[in-house]
Structure formats: structure tokens, C-alpha cells
């Protein structure tokens, strides 16, 4: 077996040299992009092809008797066909490499790649993750864990939260869970609702304030906030509920009315059962640069959790909390990186 390397400006050119030098029976063993051409000359898009020719084939062909030679020629035809197909596949792979980045993933990591994509992790993110991980699930989880920033509720335990997000994402339900959690830690919670229009929402907040025995103010505009906030600040966490259809305007008002900074943490809630694009659209609709942290709701409704990884990276905000069901006060969790990474790869 004679093995030789050939370099060409393209895979096709390298292949032609292989054919010229080693003949049509040459087998392509591998190919890769290289920066340097023959004699160390820098060549921008060079392709190096490693080819082999079985030099014993000639001897076999010479020594074989004529009767056997007839059968051999059939085999030879099939081999030729296979070599042709291999060349074609190599050529196709080279042509597709720039437009199908997944071809960068080696055979040993293909299973993990498929798993990530099946869980909804963005293809580009999956490729980068696998370039940084070894070919084991534990190593992959380790890399995912490093990328996830989890802040928890500590920064908000004193100042409080204003929850923002699209309609129905779970703002009022989450505020209720957080209020119970903080009340159980003996924090003197202060409730404010900017949702003064809907009877159901107001009744819900009134009931919550009764349950945890804390004051509630229902206001119409962000301009009503400064006097309450500056009076109550420092006494305990302030939890502010907002109506979903107005989150963009509310953020604009906050920027205008609190030019030197808003003292309550702004947490944007995203529905984990929505796909990445839909959730991202809601995020991009508002002044997202003003948001301090994110939270994921409805984890119980999601069938895959890759979007949690995508959105953590795309928003580049730390995670405050996740909601794991509709039940108040139990279905809330400050996840560990281990828990989240487990969800993202499809287990726990
Ligand atoms: N399954 C499940 N349902 C939830 C979760 N969080 C909230 N919900 C439900 O989602 C629905 C909407 O929740 P809300 O808290 O009213 O949502 P919102 O964001 O305040 O809605 P708007 O004020 O209309 O924008 C309710 O039926 C909740 O019970 C969760 O984590 N899992
Ligand atoms: Mg609400």
C-alpha cells in the first residue's frame, strides 16, 4: 500500500493530481483544509488530500489465470464503483463544509451533537459546546454549567423585583410565589401593582396581600412609583407586578422617570415552553439593556430545555429563578447549574 499526500487549491484540484499520479484506483483516505501549500508557501484555501494505492493489485492482476481473471474483473468493477462513490462523497463533504458547519463535528461527538439539537440547543451553540467538550456527557454538562450564570434572588432580597414580560408568561403568579418565599424569610414585603385595569388581577393581588399580611398599592402609572419607592425603600423588598401588554412602555417610563437608576431589580420572565425565536422576539421588543436578570416560567409545560441555554447566552443576563408549575407557593426554584445543565441535555 502506497500512501501519499496531495495539496491543491480545492478538493477537486487535489483529486485530479491524485488521479494523475496514482491512477483511477487510488483511494482517498482523508482530506482537510490547510493554510500552507507545497514548499511552505502560504495558500489561503488549500486542501490536503491523503490518498492510497494498493500496489499489490498490479501483481495480482498479472499473476492471476485468465479464467479467474474474468471473475476478478467483476470485483474490480465494483471496487472501482465504490472508489468513485467515495471520491464523490469526499468532494460533496468538502463542498458542503462551509454551509453545513455540523460537518466540523467529529464522529465521536456526533451522538452528543444530535442530542443537543434534539433538545432545541441552537446548532451553532451546539457546535461550539462540542468543540470545548470531550466526547462524554459529563464533560458536555461541565461546559454547559460554565456558560450558565445563576444569580438567584439574593440581590433582590433587599431591593425587590419588578417583573416584566409578555402577556400570560406568569408574572402575577411568580410575584405571588416570590412574595411567599420572602415572607417565609421574615422579609417585610411591599406589594405594588401597575395592573389597575383588570378586576381578576386586582383581586388576586388583594388576596395575596391578605395572605402574607403585607401592604398593597394598585397604581396606574410609573409616575406614581417614585413617592412610594423612596418612602418604602430600605424597609424591605418591593415587589411590582406589571400588565403584560405594556412592558416596553413601562421600561421607557422607568428610564425617563428614574434617570439616575431604578432601585428595584428588573427581572424579565420568559416562558420555557416557547421556542427560542418566539421568546427572543419578546425580549428584543423592549429596552432589554435595562433588564438586570431573567427568569423562566412554565418549565413543567416544556418538552425540551435547549432554549434555556440559548436564551441565557443570547440575553447574556443572569438567571434569578425558574417556575416549575402553576402552584403557589411551591412551584418556584433557584436552580443550580447542575440542575439546569441536566435539563438542557435532556435528563435531570
Ligand atoms: N403550568 C404552569 N402554569 C403557570 C406557571 N406560571 C403561571 N402559570 C399559569 O399561567 C397563566 C397566566 O399566569 P399569570 O401569572 O396571570 O401571567 P401574567 O404574566 O401575570 O399575565 P398578564 O398579567 O395577563 O400579562 C395562569 O393560568 C397561571 O396559573 C408555571 O410555571 N407553570
Ligand atoms: Mg398578571
Image (spheres, rainbow, N blue to C red):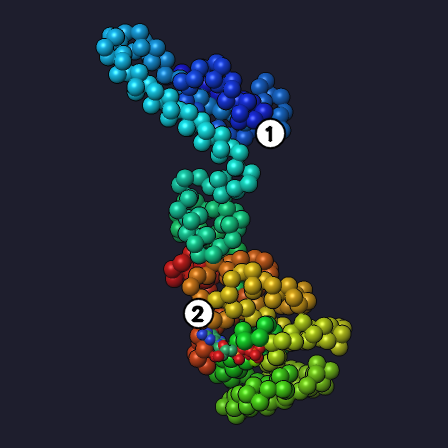
Residue at the spot of label 2: 301
Residue drawn at (46%, 23%), measured in percent from left and top? 50
Q: Can residue 74 be seen in this snapshot? A: yes
Residue drawn at (60%, 66%), measured in percent from left and top? 282
In the foreground, 248 or 175:
248
Figure quadrant of the C terminus: bottom left
Q: Quadrant of residue 26?
A: top left
Residue drawn at (64%, 63%), measured in percent from left and top? 284
**Residue 63 percent across, percent down from the top left:** 27, 7
Residue at the spot of label 1: 45
Q: Can residue 156 be seen in this snapshot? A: no
Would the CB of label 1 be found within 8 Å of ligand 1? Answer: no
**Residue 66 percent across, percent down from the top left:** 25, 8
In the foreground, 222 or 101:
101
In the foreground, 148 or 10:
10
Would the CB of label 2 be found within 8 Å of ligand 1? Answer: yes
Mark 1 residue element: strand
Q: Earlier in the sequence, mark 1 or mark 2?
A: 1
Q: Is residue 196 above or below residue 1?
A: below
Mark 2 residue element: helix
Q: Is residue 306 left or right of residue 281?
A: left
Q: How many marks?
A: 2
Amino acid at each position: 500500500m502506497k500512501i501519499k499526500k496531495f495539496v491543491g487549491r480545492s478538493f477537486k484540484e487535489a483529486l485530479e493530481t491524485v488521479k494523475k499520479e496514482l491512477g483511477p484506483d487510488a483511494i482517498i483516505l482523508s482530506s482537510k483544509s490547510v493554510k500552507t501549500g507545497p514548499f511552505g508557501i502560504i495558500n489561503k484555501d488549500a486542501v490536503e488530500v491523503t490518498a492510497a494505492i494498493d500496489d499489490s493489485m498490479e501483481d495480482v492482476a498479472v499473476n492471476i489465470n485468465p479464467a479467474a481473471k474474468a471473475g476478478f474483473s467483476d470485483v474490480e468493477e465494483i471496487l472501482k464503483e465504490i472508489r468513485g462513490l467515495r471520491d464523490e462523497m469526499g468532494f460533496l463533504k468538502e463542498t458542503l463544509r462551509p454551509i453545513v458547519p455540523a460537518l466540523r463535528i467529529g464522529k465521536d461527538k456526533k451522538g452528543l451533537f444530535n442530542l443537543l439539537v434534539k433538545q432545541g440547543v441552537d446548532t451553532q451553540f451546539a457546535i461550539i459546546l462540542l468543540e470545548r467538550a470531550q466526547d462524554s456527557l459529563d464533560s458536555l454538562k461541565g461546559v454547559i454549567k460554565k456558560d450558565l450564570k445563576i444569580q438567584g434572588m439574593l440581590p433582590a432580597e433587599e431591593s425587590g423585583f419588578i417583573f416584566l414580560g409578555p402577556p400570560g408568561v406568569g408574572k402575577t403568579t411568580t410575584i405571588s410565589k416570590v412574595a411567599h418565599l420572602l415572607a417565609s424569610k421574615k422579609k417585610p414585603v411591599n406589594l405594588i401593582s401597575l395592573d389597575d385595569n383588570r378586576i381578576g388581577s386586582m383581586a388576586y393581588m388583594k388576596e395575596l396581600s391578605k395572605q402574607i399580611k403585607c401592604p398593597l398599592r394598585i397604581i396606574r402609572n410609573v409616575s406614581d412609583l417614585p413617592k412610594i419607592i423612596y418612602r418604602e425603600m430600605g424597609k424591605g423588598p418591593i415587589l411590582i407586578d406589571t400588565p403584560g401588554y405594556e412592558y416596553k412602555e413601562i421600561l421607557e417610563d422607568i428610564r425617563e422617570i428614574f434617570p439616575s437608576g431604578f432601585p428595584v431589580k428588573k427581572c424579565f420572565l420568559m416562558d420555557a415552553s416557547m421556542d427560542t425565536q418566539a421568546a427572543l422576539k419578546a425580549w428584543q421588543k423592549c429596552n432589554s439593556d435595562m433588564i438586570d436578570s431573567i427568569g423562566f416560567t412554565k418549565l413543567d409545560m416544556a418538552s425540551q430545555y435547549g432554549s434555556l441555554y440559548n436564551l441565557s447566552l443570547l440575553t447574556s443576563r443572569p438567571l434569578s429563578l425558574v417556575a416549575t408549575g402553576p402552584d403557589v407557593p411551591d412551584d418556584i426554584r433557584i436552580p443550580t447549574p447542575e440542575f439546569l445543565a441536566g435539563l438542557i441535555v435532556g435528563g435531570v
